[in-house]
Image (cartoon, rainbow, N blue to C red):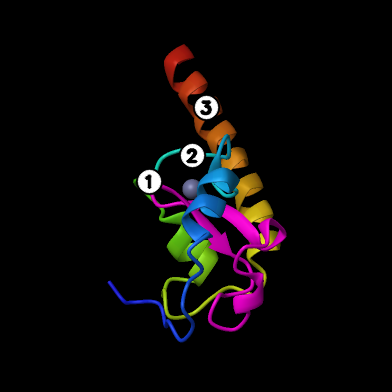
Amino acid sequence: MDKKPLEHKRSSKWPEVRKVFLMGKTCAVCGGKKKLEAHHKKPFHLHPDKELDPANLIALCEGNKEVNCHLFVGHLGNFRGFNPEVEKDAGEWKEKLSDNKQRIAKTAEVETSA
Ligand SMILES: [Zn+2]
């Protein structure tokens, strides 16, 4: 896997800030709870001053079997890049995934009643 560019040293407080931020959180895309990451909306290498700012964080998971929400929505498929519209996209994809779940549930209903 590609390494994220690290031009600035990470704060020693980051692990604690990350842990506190992720407490009770679910993935902003799929609602999952497995392998959650605290993703920086404004990337650390461009905005190191926002590293510990909870307002700059969004919870994205890597535990969804079908989609790696952190990689796709947070980084648009490449950890070397980032998505400047991560919050908007996370909201839209969350809705799409939930609509799709309902469609699947309806299909299952039709199949079992047929
Ligand atoms: Zn997810």
Mark 2 CB in 8 Å range of ligand 1? yes
| The magenta segment | 35-62
Q: Position of residue 11 (x, y in %)?
A: 51, 68
- The quadrant of the image that shows the C terminus is top left
Q: What distance separates the C-alpha of mark 2 from that of mark 1?
A: 7 Å
Out of 105 and 38, give the one closest to the viewer.
38
Q: What distance separates the C-alpha of mark 3 from that of mark 1?
A: 22 Å
Badge 2 marks a residue whose secondary structure is: loop
Q: Are marks 2 and 1 in contact (CB under 8 Å)?
A: yes
- The quadrant of the image that shows the N terminus is bottom left
Q: Which residue is mark 1?
A: 63
Out of 49 and 93, give the one closest to the viewer.
49
Q: Which mark is residue 49?
A: none
Query: Which residue is depicted at the point 67% across and 63% down?
Result: 56
Q: Is residue 21 left or right of residue 1?
A: right
Q: Are marks 3 and 1 in contact (CB under 8 Å)?
A: no
Which numbered disc, 2 or 1, marks the residue that appears first in the sequence? 2
Q: Position of residue 89 (x, y in %)?
A: 65, 61
Q: What distance separates the C-alpha of mark 2 from that of mark 3?
A: 18 Å
Residue 53 part of the magenta-drawn span: yes
Q: Is residue 79 left or right of residue 19?
A: left
Mark 1 CB in 8 Å range of ligand 1? yes
Query: Which residue is depicted at the point 59% across and 47% down?
Result: 21
Which numbered disc, 2 or 3, marks the residue that appears first in the sequence? 2
Amino acid type at image mark 1: Gly
For residue 50, say whether it is visible: yes
Q: Which residue is mark 3?
A: 105
Badge 3 marks a residue whose secondary structure is: helix
Q: Are marks 2 and 3 in contact (CB under 8 Å)?
A: no
